[in-house]
Amino acid sequence: MNSRLFTTQRADAYCRATLHNLSLVMQPEIFNSTPVSVSFLNCFYGLLRYMTELRGLVRISNADIEGKTSLVMGLTRIHGIDHMFAAAVCTALQLDRSQKIGLMSEDDIHKVEAFLKNPSGVPLWLLNRRHDVYEGTTRHVTGTDLKFVTDNDIKMMKKIKAYKGMRHAAGQPVRGQSTKAHFRHGTAVGVAKKAKAGKKS
């Protein structure tokens, strides 16, 4: 079943035709019983909708997310969003965090993108850019903007000769890690073998 050739109307018609054919084959007393027929209809139509309407890739905030991923896990694929912030987005927008991203409507996707640009109603400690040095505001940065801001922060620390900036410039760990046995990459230091002298003729 090719999802590109299927539409919602054709899926609904196909579902009803299949159920009609099944009703002719199955025993009438079994098919006409409400619990069996309704549950089977919901299951079959849900599967058919999943196969026909599910999009393979959904683009949110310049990030490609697989359509079969749930909303709360798919948002974590965006650079700058962790699981806790993704759950806060679902709660603030009143969206089902377990729904597949490929089945979301365009309006819901636009709501998520607008909320990521201006997260209102989220605790300030969840934001990753509090008291910004350049703008003096508290905001949340994602995607390529986060990489750009991080690079600018490192350049500023190098320029003012801060300790962290000097460690960045030297290519050494910044957060106080031990360097006796680790971070020994770079110039190889070892015992150099002496070149063998050529035989005298």
Image: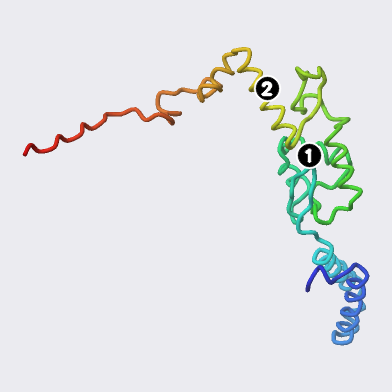
Instruction: Pick whichever, 193 or 24, lies toward us.
Output: 193
Helix, strand or loop at mark 1 = helix
Residue at the (50%, 23%) spot, across then down? 177
Relative to residue 72, is residue 173 depicted above or below? Answer: above
- Res 139 quadrant in image: top right
Kind of residue at disc 1:
Ala
Q: Residue at x 77, y 27 (%)?
A: 127
Q: Nearer the viewer, mark 2 or mark 1?
A: 2
- Dot 2 falls on a residue whose secondary structure is helix
- x, y (%) of residue 67? 76, 55
Left or right of 158, for residue 14: right
**Nearer-the-camera pick, 91 or 150:** 150
Q: Which residue is drawn at the image coordinates 59% and 13% (left, top)?
A: 161
Residue type pointed to by label 2: Asp
Left or right of residue 191, residue 37 in this image: right
Numbered tag placed on residue 160 in the rendering: none
Q: Is residue 37 above or below residue 122?
A: below
Q: Quadrant of the C terminus?
A: top left
Quarter of the rendering containing residue 147:
top right
**Mark 2 Cα shell of 10 Å, populated few (<14), some (14-19), many (≥20):** some
The x and y percentages for residue 199 are: 10, 38
Residue displayed at 84% across by 30% down: 122
Quadrant assignment for the N terminus: bottom right
For residue 153, the mark is 2
- Indicate whether 81 appears above or below 2: above
Could you tell which of marks 2 and 1 lies nearer the N-terminus?
1
User: Is disc 1 surrounded by few (<14), some (14 to 19) or many (20+) residues within 10 Å?
Assistant: some
Q: Are marks 2 and 1 in contact (CB under 8 Å)?
A: no
- Residue 138, percent from left and from top: 81, 22
- Tell me the residue that label 1 is attached to: 87
